[in-house]
Image (cartoon, rainbow, N blue to C red):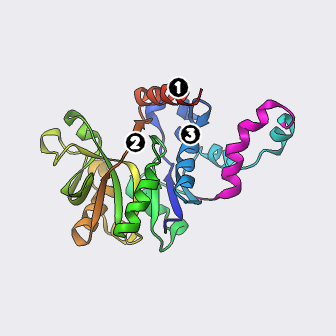
């Protein structure tokens, strides 16, 4: 059973400067909820209640958000606004939150490895909060993990001219929308990409990934790439790529963030 999730949240969020100079990217609000809120709700819907964060400097707002605020709650307790905190308080009551700091920004693979003390020898989900997903993607992936008992990565088709922004996989389709991975490349040149199946920010990883990350040398951009460790895992064992059902918004970009805001505003109004 998947009970743990890791949120890498130490990045600088430079595409959203100047806002992210003081506000963590994960705390940017889509309508009236920060990105991290949507990711945690997705975890809870998948039965995952042990949430770990890999953070960095200027990320204290995440911890404050996931804690009670007695003064605020006292102030609004008899007003109609009290219900606005119901979902957040449910998170606090149902989940445990733990934190570790990434001392250097050395890539997603390094961030995941930094989170090892929070995970231990357990399979776990990884959620990148700026990939905001609608459709309970993690719930779908947990079901696949229970079937295949191996690493599962979420993929979607992207325009060919955008493959250089993602990790990209190739593989054999073994069931509808389910692929046995045989190759993956981090941010390939467009003409060298093995496909247009891009990895998005949802993973279920088996704990042997930590040792593979320790063995992984810096790759694209001089960073320790999770993609490189996953490729080794695929060649030595098995990695499944899943073309998920639902919608994903790239909230790491201003365009995707605005699209998500409009979508969730229409959905929730």
The residue nearer to you, when weighing 123 against 28, is: 123
Report the quarter where the C terminus lies.
top right
Q: Secondary structure at mark 2?
A: loop
Residue 81 tag number: none
Residue for badge 3: 24
Report the side of 24 relative to 254 (left or right). right
Instruction: Give the residue furthest to the front.
Output: 176
The residue that mark 1 highlights is 266
- What separation in Å lies between label 3 and label 2 (alpha carbons)? 26 Å
Q: Which residue is found at the position 19% from the left and 36% from the top? A: 160
Q: How many residues crowd around disc 1 within 10 Å: few (fewer than 14), some, or many (20 or more)?
A: few
Task: Give the magenta part as a residue range.
Answer: 77-99
Query: Residue 58, how many percent across, how many down?
Result: 60, 43
**Going by the picture, which residue comes out furthest to the bottom?**
121
Q: Is residue 179 left or right of residue 115?
A: left
Whether residue 217 is visible to the viewer of this picture, yes or no, is no
At 44% from the left and 27% from the top, the residue drawn is 259
* Residue 117 image point, x, y percent: 53, 68
**Pointer 1 or 2: first along the chain:** 2
| Front position among marks 1 and 3 | 1
Per the image, the residue denoted by label 2 is 246
Alpha carbon separation for disc pair 1 and 2: 17 Å
Q: Which type of secondary structure does the marked residue at label 1 adopt?
A: helix
Residue 142 location (% of width, % of height): 44, 60
Please give the name of the residue rendered at 42% of the width and 61% of the height, measured from the top-left corner. 143
| Secondary structure predominantly adopted by residues drawn in magenta | helix
Count of marks, rendered view: 3
Q: Is residue 164 left or right of 113 when viewed as pictured?
A: left
- Say which of 77 and 52 sits in front: 77
Could you tell me if the residues under marks 3 and 2 are in contact, i.e. CB atoms within 8 Å?
Answer: no
């Amino acid at each position: 059973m998947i009970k743990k999730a890791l949120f890498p949240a130490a990045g600088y969020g430079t595409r959203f400067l100047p806002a992210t100079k003081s506000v963590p990217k994960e705390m940017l609000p889509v309508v009236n909820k920060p990105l991290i809120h949507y990711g945690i709700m997705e975890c809870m819907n998948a039965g995952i209640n042990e949430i770990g964060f890999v953070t960095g400097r200027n990320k204290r707002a995440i911890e404050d958000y996931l804690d009670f605020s007695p003064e605020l709650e006292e102030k609004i307790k008899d007003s109609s606004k009290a219900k606005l905190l119901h979902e957040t308080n449910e998170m606090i009551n149902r989940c445990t939150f733990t934190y570790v700091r990434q001392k250097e920004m050395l890539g997603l693979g390094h961030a995941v490895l930094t989170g090892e003390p929070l995970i231990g020898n357990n399979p776990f989900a990884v959620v990148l909060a700026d990939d905001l997903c609608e459709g309970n993607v993690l719930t779908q992936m947990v079901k696949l993990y229970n079937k295949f008992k191996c690493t599962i990565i979420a993929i979607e088709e992207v325009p060919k001219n955008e493959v250089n922004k993602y990790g990209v996989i190739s593989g054999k389709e073994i069931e509808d929308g389910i692929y046995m991975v045989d190759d993956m490349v981090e941010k390939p040149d467009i003409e060298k990409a093995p496909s247009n199946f891009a990895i998005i920010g949802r993973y279920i990883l088996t704990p042997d990934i930590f040792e593979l990350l320790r063995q992984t040398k810096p790759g694209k951009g001089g960073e320790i790439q999770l993609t490189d460790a996953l490729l080794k895992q695929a060649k030595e064992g098995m990695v499944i790529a899943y073309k998920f059902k639902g919608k994903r918004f790239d909230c790491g970009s201003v365009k995707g963030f605005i699209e998500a805001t409009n979508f969730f505003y229409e959905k929730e109004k």
